[in-house]
Amino acid sequence: MTAMAGPHRRVAFVVFDGVTMLDVTGPSEVLHQAGRLAPPYEVLLVSPRGGPVTTSPGITLSGTVPASEAGPLHTLVVAGGDRLARQPVERELLDAVATLSGHAERVASVCTGAFVLAELSLLDGRRATTHWRHAGTLARRYPRVRVESDAIHVRDGRYVTSAGISAGIDLTLALVEEDHGAGVAREVARELVVFMQRPGGQSQFSTALDTPPARSTLLRALVAEVLSDPAADHGMDAMAARAAVSPRHLTRLFRAELGTTPARWLERVRLDRAQQLLIEGHSVTLAAQASGLGSDETLRRVFARHLGTTPTEFRSRFTTTGTAAASG
């Protein structure tokens, strides 16, 4: 998208009572830091009625203006709040976003802010995401929205939606890259000590985070041991011996408690580790060896099977935010 001419890009955050505070402060800080390296953004807070707004932790945001006074915008960001997914969106909030979105060059949402855009039919026929906990509700309530429940952020035309809470930072880094290039976005990410794009590509989860807690002490200890050193000897016989059970019994435990086999789970753990090493700039060979996958060829096969890409292509994505823009 062609950037707006002039020294400022006006970005409005739509906020309301109960808004998730980090949905606003995280992206705002990204824009602030970008303004130290490139033409600055002009950030304003807009609420349905103007005046003070109380965030979910009880901290007040002052100085918000009503939509009628916001003026022309480059970017509109609709922040989220839990109640947007639990109850109908109130008319005055819908009216405010409708007014603002009609004059913005691009429209974004953080977390459950996607429910506001969906209620206005702005996401009909488009790809979108939200917090993983509310993705099913979004898909059921708005069947014309193509919900990608495991994505960090999704771009479709002039609409950009992100997953929950801290994912607003990822989304805003992508917008900064779009406006000012990957170099500026990379410097902002370094300043904020965050990734340009999270480990695991566009996934909201890693294997470690997505593994349900094991019920048995035996399996909890084994899972923790593997996660702490994926490259160690974690063959079936070795893991069974450390757990003092037979390989068959270990397989039964994994299926009963984690819903998978030891080999499949281990491969995903090692894939996570290889991704992290590539993001950090290590070679494909080192990533294969240090993750426990062994050879370059094994790493390539695992990447193709799980991610549909090559290790080299994956690593190149992390010099950018990697957001693919769909036409429409």
Image: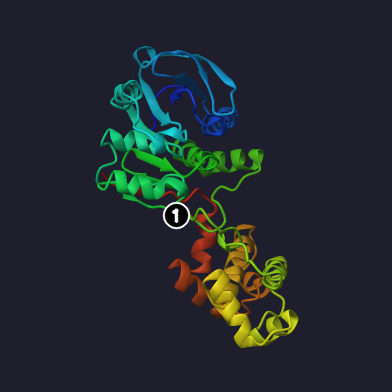
Determine the residue positioned at 52% across, 29% down: 24
Query: Measured along the vertical axis of the image, is residue 127 above or below residue 210?
Result: above
Answer left or right for 227 relative to 145: right
The answer to whether residue 109 is visible is: yes
Query: Measured along the vertical axis of the image, is residue 40 above or below residue 222?
Result: above
Q: Give the percent coordinates (x, y) of residue 244.
A: 74, 83
Determine the residue positioned at 31% across, 38% down: 118
Question: Callout 1 environment at 10 Å: few (<14), some (14 to 19), or many (20+)?
Answer: some
What residue is pinned by disc 1?
150
Determine the residue positioned at 66% across, 83% down: 235
Question: Which quadrant of the figure contains the N terminus?
Answer: top left
Answer left or right for 15 relative to 284: left
Q: Give the percent coordinates (x, y) of residue 80.
A: 46, 34
Q: Amino acid at mark 1?
A: Asp
Q: Nearer the viewer, residue 161 or 226?
A: 226
Query: Measured along the vertical axis of the image, is residue 299 above or below residue 100?
Result: below
